[in-house]
Amino acid sequence: MIRAVLFDLDETLFDHRAAVAHAATAWTRTLVPGHEPPAGVLALWLDLERRHLPAWHASECSFAEQRRRRLRDFCGRLRLPLPADLDAAYAEFLVHYETAWAAFPDAADTVDALSGRGLTLGVLTNGEPVQQEAKLRRIGLMDRLDPVLTPDALGGAFKPAPECYLAAAAKLGLRPTEILLVGDDRERDAIGPARVGMRGVWLDRHGTGHTGGPPTPPRITSLRELPALLT
């Protein structure tokens, strides 16, 4: 019996791609006035996230350092001048990023639909706690989702490490089999939790479909499909 539902945050409840698209474009225009960013600026930024965040996850560098590495590569790929102070430059990027913070239209509706079922509703995210909690406050979900579990609260374990899901279950005082995790990453949010007995649901917002690898647990294309899986 499912007693708790944990949501991933970025690209599940929170529209990270839209905020990044706005920020990367606006920041590039600020860095080089009159320069029009290329059409692939969003894809480049997201690719650099995928390349550099794992170094932080593996404790090979600090959270701030992986940001600096991303900016160096971003400017190098686009042949932009490298700011002298990368931390200050990233702070400017964040100003643009935060102005575009928004929830997906199905996020609040789904949380509301589940709130009367006696379930614990929370968040399990690989993000940094201060920023992730700020996102939830901005999109109006902080008071409706508790706990908000980040690696800081889970002994430094990141999805898809089994230790992450087991630590999350321990924080909730539940067995993994009593928890459902839903998120946009097939490995981290669907296949990974299933390895420890936790139920995973893949939110395939962009309709990419299964492209090989291990069998996928239930797949949905909108959070509004989630309540029906729990009936």
Image (spheres, helix red, strand yellow):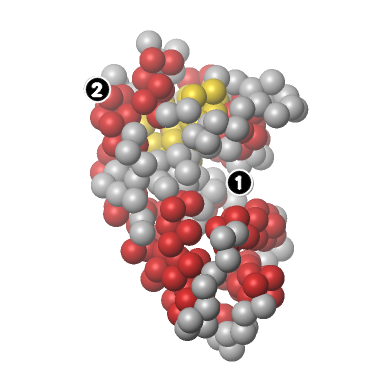
Q: CA distance from mark 2 to mark 1?
A: 30 Å
User: Can you give x and y, in whole percent of width and height, for residue 125 in the image?
Assistant: 50, 45
Locate residue 75: give its quadrant. bottom right
Label at residue 140: none
Residue farthest along the right direction in this orientation? 213
| Contact (Cβ within 8 Å) of mark 2 with mark 1 | no
Front residue of this view, candidates 60 and 154? 60
Question: Residue, x 40% and y 22% (percent of image)?
Answer: 225
User: Can you give x and y, in whole percent of width and height, for residue 174 in the image?
Assistant: 47, 25
Q: Amino acid at mark 2?
A: Gly
Asked if residue 162 lies left or right of residue 146, the reply is right
* Pointer 1 local density, CA inside 10 Å: few below 14, some 14–19, many at least 20: many
165 shown above or below 125: above
User: Can you give x and y, in whole percent of width and height, for residue 85 in the image?
Assistant: 56, 86
Asked if residue 102 lies left or right of residue 22, the reply is left
User: Can you give x and y, in whole percent of width and height, for residue 166 in the image?
Assistant: 58, 33
Q: Amino acid at mark 1?
A: Phe
Front residue of this view, candidates 155 and 148? 148
- Report which residue position mark 1 lands on: 158
Question: Residue, x 44% and y 53% (percent of image)?
Answer: 18
Q: Is residue 38 visible?
A: yes
Front residue of this view, candidates 35 and 21? 35
Q: Quadrant of the C terminus?
A: top left
At numbered mark 1, what does the secondary structure look like: helix, strand or loop?
A: loop
- Report which residue position mark 2 lands on: 116
65 shown above or below 51: below
Question: Residue, x 47% and y 47% (percent of image)?
Answer: 10
* Pointer 2 local density, CA inside 10 Å: few below 14, some 14–19, many at least 20: few
